[in-house]
Amino acid sequence: MDTPLTPRPGERPQEPHKEPRKEPRKEPRTRRRDRHGRGMRGPVAPPQVPLSASRAELFGDLVQDSVERLERRWPQLAEVEFVVAEVPGVPGAAGGAEGWSDEAVPLGGVAPAQGGRPPRILVYRRPVEIRSKSRDERALLVHEIVVEQVAELLGLSPETVDPRYGQD
């Protein structure tokens, strides 16, 4: 059945006896996903733009901003290690957070200096993110948590650590 088909409008008729010329490939072609000729997918934003930062990185920046605000007033905080953890440990587990129940999940914690390790202040990212709706609200909550934990570590009231505590 070598009957030629009628060409579509704008299409040149093919001759049945000619086959398209194929050139030998020099190396295997890697297959890449390129639908509809739009090119390869790339990053949504360049690395310099805040959009490319992950939620954990943005949260770490909020904690760092709060610490820098407090270090101006309390230089002894330079020796304190500030740590961002995803969630608090399970009560009763090795290294877990003791003394919290199902009703109250801690947003932060203090670990005193032990065995040459500096004191630590922990801020738990996921519980804070769940309790805040916007970036501004999250920044205020992170600062309050850091102030409360610094106050506990230094044995002071939160209002003494930051006079603006609770006013925002």
Image (cartoon, grey):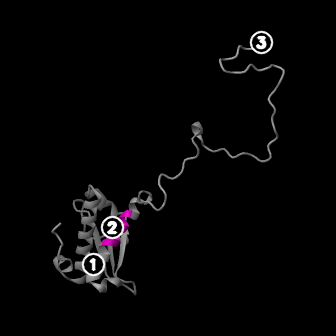
**Disc 3 residue crowd, few under 14, some 14–19, many 20+, Cα 10 Å:** few
72 or 154: nearer the viewer: 72
Pointer 2 or 3: first along the chain: 3
Q: CA distance from mark 3 to mark 1?
A: 86 Å
Residue sitting at x 42%, y 59%: 54
| Above-or-below relation of 57 to 22 | below
Q: CA distance from mark 2 to mark 3?
A: 73 Å
Where does residue 16 sit, x and y in percent of width and height?
Answer: 81, 19
Q: Amino acid at mark 2?
A: Leu
Magenta-span inclusion, residue 64: yes
Q: CA distance from mark 2 to mark 1?
A: 13 Å
Where does residue 123 sit, x and y in percent of width and height?
Answer: 32, 69
Residue sitting at x 80%, y 46%: 26
Q: Amino acid at mark 1?
A: Leu
Magenta highlight range: 58-65
Disc on res. 3: 3
Q: Which residue is mark 2?
A: 62
Where does residue 65 sit, x and y in percent of width and height?
Answer: 32, 71
| Residue 128 appears in the picture as rendered | yes
Q: Amino acid at mark 3?
A: Thr
| Above-or-below relation of 147 to 31 | below
Pointer 2 or 1: first along the chain: 2
State the SS at label 3: loop
Pointer 3 or 1: first along the chain: 3
State the SS at label 1: helix
Q: Which residue is mark 1?
A: 70
| Above-or-below relation of 78 to 52 | below
Q: Is 36 on the left or on the right of 124, as rendered?
A: right
